[in-house]
Amino acid sequence: MGRRRPRERGAATPLINRNAAWVSHPYGISPTPEEGQLAKAWVKDFRGKIAPYATGGVWLNFIGNEGQERTRAAFGNGNYARLALVKRDVDPQNIFQGNQNILPAGSCPVPRSAALGAWVRNDRP
């Protein structure tokens, strides 16, 4: 839990969910893989119990590689679509991808190794 974030308009920044009254970021750590499974189960249980009180929003710095649905939840559909158009023009091969990757508009996922090979060979479209 922390300080309340300043209110921003939805399109003022690429990220949405700035009007939430509070933020929750449960995580579990443990010294062994077995205990790690217990910690993971505790986190999932906590998220399930708090879900009825949550907005469903996502903050990018709280997630890892959890898929496009979670990334879209952080940006919102409108902002994601706008950023995907930029990505299509700037990085159509999706070379610059990370945990919260925005796919170029009109693309399907390209394996990083294939995209990087095209970049190195300079045979990009």
Image (tube, rainbow, N blue to C red):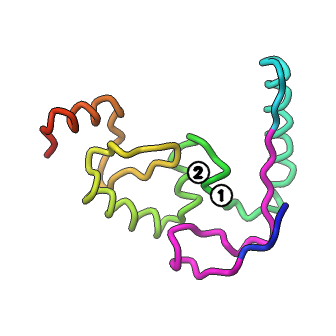
Identify residue for label 1.
58
Q: Amino acid at mark 1?
A: Val
Residue 24 sits in quarter: bottom right
Q: Position of residue 65 (x, y in %)?
A: 56, 40
Specify start and end residues of the magenta stretch as a single range.
6-27
Label 2 neighbour load within 10 Å: few <14, some 14-19, many 20+: some
- Label of residue 70 in the image: 2
Rendered location of residue 123, percent (x, y): 12, 38
Left or right of 30, for residue 5: left
Splitting the image into 4 quarters, where does residue 117 fall?
top left
Residue 64 quadrant:
top right
Judge from the rendering whether residue 120 lies leftward or rightward of residue 24; answer left or right. Answer: left
Is the residue 111 above or below the residue 78 in the image? above
Residue plotted at (27% across, 44% down):
93
Instruction: In the rendered view, tell whether residue 59 sits above or below residue 28.
Output: below
Give the x, y percent position of residue 87: 33, 57
